[in-house]
Image (spheres, grey):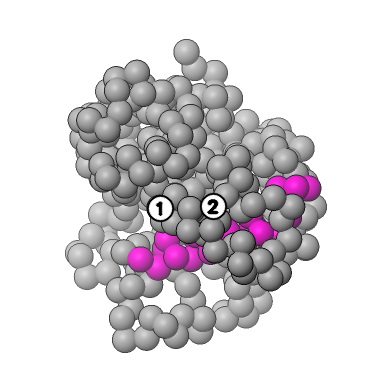
Amino acid sequence: MKGKIAFEEHIAVEETVGHAKAFAGESGRWDEFTLELLDVEEKRLAAMDKTGIELALLSLNAPGLQAVLNTEEAVEVARKANNKIARAVTQYPDRYAGLAALPMQDPNAASAELERCINELGFKGALVNGFTQKDEPDSAVYYDIQEYRDFWATVSDLDVPFYLHPRMQIPAQARNYEGHPWLMSAPWGFAVETSIHALRLCGSGVFDDFPNLRIILGHLGENIPFALWRIDARMRFSPRGYRGKRPLGEYFLEHFHITTSGNFNDPAFRCTLDVVGKDRVYFSADYPFERMEDAADWYDATSVITEEERLQIGRSNAIELFKLDLD
């Protein structure tokens, strides 16, 4: 299918490119990751052309700003990263759009940077790489806490989507992975960490305060669609500390949007569609950590959806979600 839109597609700046080393592992792809993350021209555009991806919304690689302990440094790197994305969009306005990287170490600074990116740079939303470390390496700050209500008010006022992207849990808070470091990252830990963060948002009351918030999850929903019935069923018996005014599943189905990034599997795709519906599912790749070819070859051939649905999920839904000026 030609004309696809993808929006879990990552770039890096010099301060964050080294973060990809953990993903490269012993695969021998470290040099390749470096080139692909820093490149916004020939190689990336050629891959998009080959796979029928018309437009990619660029975002900063994980953990990115969320691993910068010093707040002032995080603010500086955020501005640098977003300016790089803005330059790519200016150079290739028909191929790229931007998702803001935000210094969540300071909610007010994050709000200000988001306002700059949306109002001055023309970005379409934000992508944040999970919890934020601040001041101390062993810290982990999640965005359901009261200190972030003004930040969510800014997101609400700007009426833009917020992509909650995975990151690896820090070792000090990951004793259950001891002896099995492979579990901490993409095979399992990414989904665990991101799904817990998403569920914390559902249980925090933030969607009661800001009913127009739209949160995006990749990888077919970080396992939540597959578990949503049981989550809701057991919440009837274990609601301690839950601050939402409605059942958790209602918040998830109303406020969350799901991409295919990095999960190119028919049974999982079918389940996600059955749970959240075709209007809230979107194509994405997760480049360069996944191959655009793998994402597109699977998506273009899957028999789970009709040709009309393929166009909707691969293109039309994203145009509506991000208010893109495309036909």
The kind of secondary structure the magenta stretch mainly shows is helix
- Position of 150 with respect to 67 (left or right) is right
Residue at left 39%, top 47%? 220
Reading the image, the residue beneath label 2 is: 164
Label 1: element kind = helix
Image quadrant of residue 273? Answer: top left
Foreground of the two, 268 or 324: 268
Foreground of the two, 61 or 164: 164
Q: Is disc 2 surrounded by few (<14), some (14 to 19) or many (20+) residues within 10 Å?
A: many
- Image location of residue 313, percent across then percent down: 40, 29
What amino acid is labelled 1 in the image? Answer: Phe
For the N terminus, the quadrant is: top left
**Residue range highlighted in magenta:** 188-209
What amino acid is labelled 2 in the image? Answer: Leu
Residue 198 falls inside the magenta stretch: yes
Residue at left 62%, top 69%? 238
Say if residue 104 shows up in the picture.
no
Q: Is disc 1 surrounded by few (<14), some (14 to 19) or many (20+) residues within 10 Å?
A: some
Instruction: In the rendered structure, find residue 226 and report the number of the disc placed on it.
Output: 1
- Position of 315 with respect to 71 (left or right) is left
Is the C-beta separation of discs 1 and 2 under 8 Å?
no
Image quadrant of residue 176? Answer: bottom left
Residue 74 falls inside the magenta stretch: no
Label 2: element kind = strand
- Image location of residue 232, percent across then percent down: 55, 56
Question: From the viewer's perspective, is the residue at label 1 or at label 2 nearer?
Answer: 1
Cα gap from disc 1 to disc 2, whole angstroms: 18 Å
